[in-house]
Image (tube, helix red, strand yellow):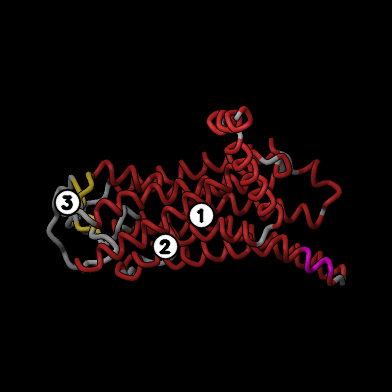
Amino acid sequence: MATRNRTEVTEFVLLGLSSWPEMQPVIFGIVLAMYLVAVTGNALLVIVALSDPKLQTPMYFLLSQLSSIDIFLTTITVPQMLVHTLSVNKTISFNHCMTQLFFFMAVGSMEGHLLAAMAYDRYVAICDPLRYSAIISRCFCLRITSTSWVVVSLNSLLYSVLVTRLTFCGNQVTHFFCDITPLLKLSCTRPVANELLIFTEGVAVVISPFFFIVGSYARIGVAIARLHSAAALRKALSTCSSHILVVLLLYGSVIRMYLRPSSTYDLEQDRQVAIFYTVVTPMLNPLIYSLRNQEVKGALRRLSRRLCISGNFQPGSQASRGQQHIS
């Protein structure tokens, strides 16, 4: 590898999603619209999952956690990107960059762990329904999510510390946020330790939930095949199809982005793929779960009715009706 000039980096320049100035207003408008849809949709799912009496089950508790993760994931990266899109100053301090890297990797990894927990929930519900309430409980889900947060936080801390120890040859990051791949690309020497970590411990923490999900659905498929029932197959598909689609959207882009050597990174393509799993996927998740789930749609209708009724009984409206009655 050719030797490059080493510089002490105190800040990075984020080049954004595109280098064309005329595209910046278009990018700003599209990304802002998707961000607002993602935050609003996921916030609605969190509200109905926590407030609707019919959704007080472990599955919807996990769904509310997934929606919260999607809000955090987009908020870690998108607001800064929107500011930089219309700004001349696109710099980010070294410490702020490492902080963003830590939280992005922790929250992004946590999404995979939540999807694995949801797959296990579906497995028990379909393959062992009589013992479902004894196995899956809110306390059980809390233990899973708490343990997962500890694991992904330690994993992200290790990645962030190793990145801070790199020597950078330049500070222009071909990305719209501080991600691991463009930062490794800026290293003056090949980051062997970081790559080894990605393909060993990274696979164990980030990709192992995917294999757990595949194993859960394989056992679900075997259990349904033994029943020889078209009705059971239709019920399983209606229960699991939304979750399977979300898993494919997430891991399709994650595997494409991270599981390869730094020498093969194509940063121009990678930042376009990154917009997919940082904005598009969080925007689609609430649509997928609400449009294909009758219970969620019913909860949304009940929430809208409650909001309409509470609006009709505001003090001002009551006073006006009282005056009309007296007259």
Quarter containing the C terminus? top right
Q: Is residue 189 in view?
A: no
Which residue is under mark 1? 206
Camera-nearest label, 2 or 3: 3
Tag 1: residue type?
A: Val
Could you say where residue 260 lies in the image, as x and y percent from the top left?
41, 67
Q: Which of marks 2 and 3 is nearer the N terminus?
A: 3
Give the SS element for disc 2: helix
Q: Residue at x 62, y 27 (%)?
A: 326
Are the two marked residues, 2 and 1, in contact with CB atoms closer than 8 angstroms?
yes
Q: Is residue 88 in view?
A: yes
Q: Which of 182 and 167 is in front in this view?
A: 182
Spatial distance from mark 2 to mark 3, Cα to Cα? 29 Å
Give the SS element for disc 1: helix
Which residue is under mark 3? 89
Are the two marked residues, 2 and 3, in contact with CB atoms closer than 8 angstroms?
no
**Magenta stretch?**
231-235
* Neighbours of disc 3 within 10 Å: few (<14), some (14-19), many (20+): few
Which residue is under mark 2? 258
- Specify the label residue 321 is tagged with: none
Camera-nearest label, 1 or 3: 3
Quarter containing the N terminus? bottom left
Spatial distance from mark 1 to mark 3, Cα to Cα? 34 Å
Could you say where residue 65 lies in the image, as x and y percent from the top left?
57, 44
